[in-house]
Image (cartoon, coloured by chain):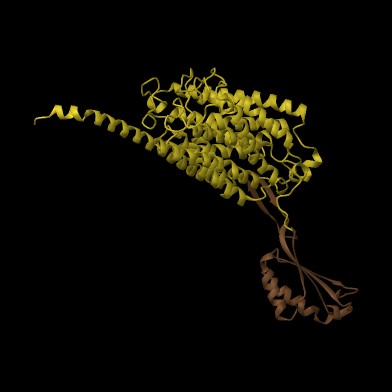
Amino acid sequence: MKKIEAIIQPFKLEDVKEALKNIGVDGMTISEVRGHGRQKGHKEVYRGQEYNVDLLPKVKFEMIVTDNRLDEVLDTIANAARTGKIGDGKIFVFDVAEAIRIRNGDRGESAI
Amino acid sequence: MHFDYAMLLQAAPDLTARLTAAEAAVKSAQSAGDNAWMLVSSALVLMMTGPGLALFYGGLVRRKNVLSTMMHSFFMMALVTVIWAIAGYSLVFAEGNPFIGGLKYLFLDGVGKEANTDYAATIPQGTFMIYQMMFAIITPGLISGAFAERIRFSAMALFTTLWVFVVYFPMAHMVWGKGGLLNAYLGGSIRTFDFAGGTVVHITSGVSALVCALYLGKRVGYPKEPHKPHSLVLSTIGACLLWVGWFGFNAGSALGASGLATTAFVATHLAAAAAALSWMAAEWMISGKPSMLGGISGCVAGLVAITPASGFVKPMPALLIGALAGMFCYWMVAKVKNMFGYDDTLDAFGVHGAGGTLGAILTGVFATNAINDTQIDGKVVALGLVDGNAGQILNQAIGVGIAIVLAVVGTYLILKVCDALIGVRVERDEEIQGLDVTQHGEEGYNLEA
């Protein structure tokens, strides 16, 4: 089992969700986050007072997939989230030790 | 043609009675019209404080201070109302000396349905009293822009109570009260023109705001850490309510549904529009983008500047006053404030102090009896520079000077007293946590609730 964390542009949220749905991935957790990589922030000016906003709004996807579906899911997210510009985001993959379905106690891949 | 005098004489008793009845009916109709407009104006001016100013200022602070800032406006609606009814109205409008009114109307004694012919002959004195009350409410509300995000609530309440007695009531009496030092129409020795409160409301509050900002010092982290407005949406709604409410403030100051009210209404609207444009144009040129905050700040600056002039100037000077105010106040808040480094949280000084002063002086330039032919000592006189009375600019400057001195000295002394008794500023950790939780035990946005 792998955990995928994908940090993407907020306006790509619907595209990525739709693409994942089309390949049959329906479990995911989404949060609104702030951050930046190489993308520079922007300047805001309030009555002449300038602020550089470098932590930009992003959306973070978290999901667990079986090893055999990993590449397919990664490609799907990357393709759907890509604009080709700086700021598109990043995807990270982690090993998952265990998964438990709280309702009935299922463990492992059947809990995903 | 032969005229039958005998018949006319016979009819005369009846004619006299009918004329008397007709005159009474005309008077009653005028009173009804004037009173309707003045009651509506009173409500409009109250709306400027709540929700107008509460939203405008509330949106400009950080989320953790939204309620405490709105409270600074809302609380005035309650506190100053009570003070005004008990003593304020009398100290401003009862006959007294040139500096403060008398005690004749204490507890609103004798203030009811009958008109007070010194001030407004066609409306009940009760209407005049409640209308003027709304001005006393908003003025300390404006100051709160300077100490927002760091004042102790109890200190704010004591400060306001003392401030209206020490600064507002004397200033309002001097300019508007019968026998007041600066009253142009009712026996003042230095005639100044302040139609709706440029000196009384905006200079006193703006200058007091600067004193507060300097006395309290900067907010924790200012200006290094971002202190961004948490909701310019709220501020925009608030500013638009201020714009509309200002028609009551300025056009209502005609004290009747007259042509002068229309003139003031037009001047007010034109100045607000011109100032919104000029502020946005200035920041577009200097910082690259026209902003919503710039637009609403500009319209308020224009409204402030036209306030003393609104019942005295023609439409084109009104446009000019607004345009100058937008640029001048932008320069004050975007450049001068940073030059001196004081932390006037919401720019009460930069907008109300600076805009009010500009407007008061320009009133001396553009005031004309072609717009306001109210008689002084039984005749129509030259008003401002455009009427050939250059000396009026000096009178206006004296009025401004008195307002500034009174505001600086009064506010400083009151702050000293409040600091000694209570402590004006919250503790550092309270300030970091936010005034909503530490002063009021509540939060503006309980999104998880």
Q: Where in the figure is residue B345, as x and y percent of width and height?
A: 67, 39
**Can residue B288 be seen at all in this image of the molecule?**
no
Q: What is the residue that sits farthest to the right in this orientation?
A: A97
Q: Which chain is in brown here? A: A
Quadrant showing the N terminus of chain A: bottom right
- Specify whether B182 is left or right of B137: left
**Can residue B40 be seen at all in this image of the molecule?**
yes
Q: Nearer the viewer, residue B353 or B177?
A: B177
Q: Residue at x 24, y 28 (%)?
A: B13
Seen in the picture, residue B395 relative to B289 is either above or below; the reply is above
Seen in the picture, residue A42 relative to B248 is either above or below; the reply is below
Q: Which chain is in yellow here? A: B
Q: Where in the figure is residue B61, as x and y percent of width and height?
A: 68, 45
Q: What is the residue that sits farthest to the left in this orientation?
A: B1
Q: Where in the figure is residue B128, as x and y percent of width and height?
A: 49, 32
Q: Residue at x 75, y 35 (%)?
A: B425
Residue B185 location, quadrant: top left
Q: How many marks?
A: 0
